Amino acid sequence: MSNILRRVQTLVRSGDYIVSRHGFRELAADDIVAEEALGGIEAAFVVEEYLESRKEPSVLVLQYDRGGRPIHVMWGVPRNAGRPAILVTAYRPAPERWSNDFKRRLK
């Protein structure tokens, strides 16, 4: 498991997280309830890691909403502070751009 994902899970569990403005907009645009994105972090699967991201190390994870529909959520953790977890964005992956299990981008 990813160190970033482990850190995000710990922070979310303790209530130490924020949702970015962009994250709120994207959640609303794709009709995703914030609580589902937060609650689904425990069972998340790492799709991609961005360790050298300009702003903060981040991880794109596959989660599922209460209805079992896939959600991709980008989480970050500030490089210098180590907290809070930041929900950067979330969206419903487009089937034509992802593998059948939504874990790999199609070329």
Image: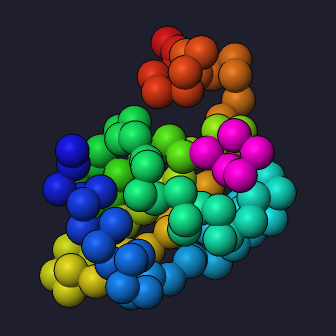
**Where residue 82 sits: x, y (%)?**
21, 80
In this rendering, is residue 65 above or below 47? below
In this rendering, is residue 37 above or below 85? above
Residue segment shown in magenta: 64-68
Asked whether, in this view, residue 51 is left or right of residue 87, the answer is left
In the rendered image, which quarter is residue 23 located in? bottom right
- Residue in view at x 69 percent, y 40 percent: 68
- Residue in view at x 28 percent, y 83 percent: 83
**Where residue 92 sits: x, y (%)?**
70, 42
**Where residue 94 sits: x, y (%)?**
70, 29
Asked whether, in this view, residue 44 is left or right of residue 29, the answer is left
Q: Is residue 82 magenta?
A: no
- Residue in view at x 68 percent, y 50 percent: 65
**Where residue 67 sits: x, y (%)?**
76, 45
Name the residue nearer the viewer: 35 or 17: 35
Is residue 54 visible from the viewing direction of this image?
no
